[in-house]
Amino acid sequence: MRSFLLEYTKRERDDVSKETEIEIDIHVNLWGVNARKPEIAPIIDFGFMVENIKSVSSIILYCPFHIDRVDDLGGILSQQPDLIEAIFNEDCEVLSKIHPNRTKITKRGDNFKSSSEDRKEFILYKLDASLIEFCDQDEYGRVEVNVKNILSGNEEVLPSLNGTDIYYFRIRIHPKDNDHIYILKRENERINILQDSSLRTTEIIDFRINDFRSITENIKEEVFRLNTFNINSIHYLIMRSSTDEFISGSDKYKSRLLEREVWKDYIELNKNNDVIAYHFKEIAEEKNENNKKYISSFTNLSRFKYPLNVGKRMLCYVLIVILISVISNLFYDFFLRFFH
């Protein structure tokens, strides 16, 4: 039970065909405990770029852990154009206050001087708390984002909204403290002087999306009744402290140093070290103009080494040294008296 599952429900409307297939781009930020202020558990941001919002009633995400709370991030992004460019990692034109809860964004590529033909327009939507519901279901956490009523039907009268049915939603998921998070495993979390004397632990991050072999039978039955998105792309970023050592993972990745002044209103970063983003991505394969091989599932296994329980381990080593010293002195006195 390690995989996230992303599904949706269709709108019950006469003009929505049952054969309509919905495309989506997925953005994931996994914030490690060393990347921000000390926390027990990491947090995960999910961004959903839905191509045809008119056909979607709700977005449903199953998480392989229990959930403490879910926050909307659309409101923060709508007020920070620099942050929007940092998240999408390209030049963006931002048109805010065009409509309540809506910000229009145009992605213009990497070269802001050129008029790229790949310009993509979409609406960043700020979700009201009432539109986000979550609960624990078996060993999973279930998040449902209700998008059924975000369109009023009057979008056509506004030039900035007319013809734009691509919507972007972004949420932050907080796992419950002290709860078992199946995608994370620390090899040397307990103090074991015989296992690792380097004061560092190895953390394994096993991240999966829609890997149906890694879910429980009860969740499989639940998901069977829902609809699966056609995934165009997955952008998965692991945020780690600059002192963490990236041991192994996919060979195809990019990394960059986060600009602290840009991200300060988005999340409270670790004040002691810089933060590095490791970016892994997968893009759907274009076979021809009318045929695309969508992403059915995504897996990434990464390993990091970083300090853990340094104070407790150092105390153990000091006590062991003192104990060895005391025993050595006792043996020395014993043999000295014995041979005399």
Image (tube, grey):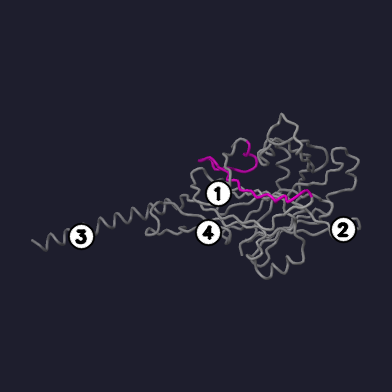
Residue 50 in percent (x, y) is at 77, 50
Mark 1 or mark 2, which has the lower sequence index?
2
Of the 4 image quadrants, the one containing the N terminus is bottom right
Judge depth for marks 4 and 3 and give the one in front.
4
Farthest residue toward the top? Answer: 113
Element carrying mark 1: loop
Q: Residue at x 83, y 57 (%)?
A: 20
Q: Which residue is mark 4?
A: 185
| Residue 223 forms part of the magenta stretch | no
Q: Residues within 10 Å of mark 1 (few under 14, many from 20)?
A: few
Where disc 3 sits, the SS reads: helix
* 273 relative to 227 in the view: left or right: left
Question: Front-most of 280 and 187?
Answer: 280
Find disc 3 in the rendering and name its residue.
Answer: 330
First in sequence: mark 4 or mark 2?
2
Q: How many marks?
A: 4
